[in-house]
Image (spheres, grey):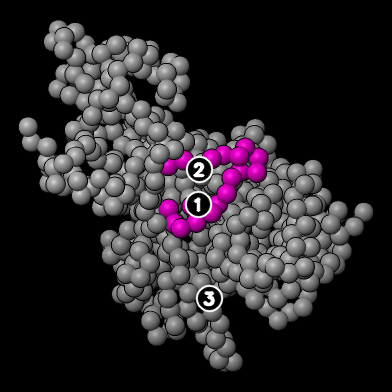
Amino acid sequence: MDYSLEDGKWSDPFDELLDSRTKLRKMNIVTQSVRVPHNIDSSVENSSFIEIKETIHEDKPLTCEDCFIKVHCPSDSISTPCDKRLGAVLFNCGLSPITRLKLEGFEGSSDTDTKDANINVNVENPFLNINASPNMCSNFGKRQLSKSYKMVTVVHPSSIVLKPGKWRKSLNNFIRTKITEINFNKKVERSSICQDRKSLVLKGEHKFKNKCEEEVLKYCDQSIPLPFNDAYEQNKLLNSIKIGEGAYGEVFLCSKNQNRLEKHISNIVLKIIPLEGSTEINGEKQKSFSQILPEIIITTKMSSLQTNKINSTDGFVSIHKVSLVKGNYPQHFIKLWEKYDNEKGSENDHPRLFGENQLFVILELKFAGSDMANFQFLNSEQSYYALLQIILALAVGEEEYQFEHRDLHLGNILIEYTNKKHIIFTLKNTHLTVLSKGVNMTIIDYTLSRITIDSCCYFNDLSSDEELFQATGDYQYDVYRLMRNELKNNWSLFSPKTNILWLSYVIAKLLDSVKYKNINTKVHRMYIDKIKELQNIIMTFESATHCATYMFNLN
């Protein structure tokens, strides 16, 4: 009998390093059947699996009694997920403060070609030691299997585990590479797992109906789309660099001459979003005019709060300009994209695939620093006053526009150093001053936000976006489920409690996730206690306004 392993048996070289008997195997002294990991990015799958041999009864279908079960114990495994997709912070995101969710690995894939599985255990109740539902065995036994399969791998159903932050991007990567159906080797179609996103809905009487393209052009101060390459020539943009990406598109930072008379140069962010095309981009259908229009309106309205007299804040990102352009992706942007891809690894599709008739909306936004997930605070005193800025900004939005952000993870909070000693707010005609402690906070990204403008409600209907509510991996995904419960899955409702849910998330992150420079000081310990005190009472508030009223003694 030949005890040698086949060539290419090790799909993951890290598996070989982990096994203390590797050298003995190579010498044919010890042999062990090796199951190829379905998750190529991990040394093992963090789920139970079932191995099934073909029945010896040629004239009968395979049933539960014919199954030999091998139970995989996750506690004995060492997982090595791909950091490009999951990021190094996966194991730093902590447990949920509410449900104490444990992090689990990705589901493995069903694989009809899996070979060399060792059958170790034959038990009367094959599901006794498997973490599965009681009905799974009976359903399993009743199903007839094709005799052409010598073995089928069935993966125990589990939640979709996503990294914190831009969940849509993480979900698309999951869908592209990991999702399989429990139903015996039949791959799940994308459409059955990830439903197309519903557009932002306009509720009430409004003039935008069936005129979204005209309205977008109006906000752009254009009559027709501009040629992409002419509108954003390379010589008009200085020190350009790609700084981010999402399922929606690309983000570039550049310096631009905002006022040629004064020769004033300012840093701006270009958020480039493909529009109305038939080609699917980054696992998503391209946005339509009806979908992008509310985002433009919300961004513009929240930016305008800087000059409002009754409720004012500069805590929402400033928008300089909106442009509608048409044509191939400019070569200088492609070079920046490729540089980013070479250095950091892009998960988006290459922009060369866009044709000459492709439309794009470009939002020109003020650069507002780095996101909270990547920012290092000096100490908890600084983060405490940053939190106060976030609370007041949300309160101002609630009072003026019945605003709910609904997606305030750390990637949507930007922090920039400032020389200003105080940050000024106006809430219900009351002027409030907050110590800056050297940082200025800005809230961005209103894709999921809800707002009321002139009796017209804009919101994103997530009622059928079921995969979002199945996700785990961070307290962030608990918050989406808590929002759904709060709104009774009616996403048009104004319920500022959702802002409180996100504030509870931010507070949790300030305590267990964000980075601090000086932690062994009396000041740091004192403000950690203050943040903990707020954590203990945050869920008793009904809105950010309610919280701000308490924090600043506005009664």
**Label 2 Cα crowd, 10 Å radius (few <14 / some 14-19 / many 20+):** some
Picture coordinates of residue 164, whole percent (x, y):
52, 52
Prevalent SS, magenta region: loop
The amino acid beneath tag 2 is Leu
Give the quadrant of the C terminus.
bottom right
| 441 on left or right of 89 | right
Q: Residue at x 86, y 60 (%)?
A: 552
Q: Secondary structure at mark 1?
A: helix
Q: Residue at x 35, y 70 (%)?
A: 343
Picture coordinates of residue 294, whole percent (x, y):
56, 54
The residue wearing badge 1 is: 91
| 67 on left or right of 504 | left
**Label 1 Cα crowd, 10 Å radius (few <14 / some 14-19 / many 20+):** few
132 w.r.t. 395: above or below: above
Q: Nearer the viewer, residue 416 or 134?
A: 134
Which residue range is magenta in the image? 86-105
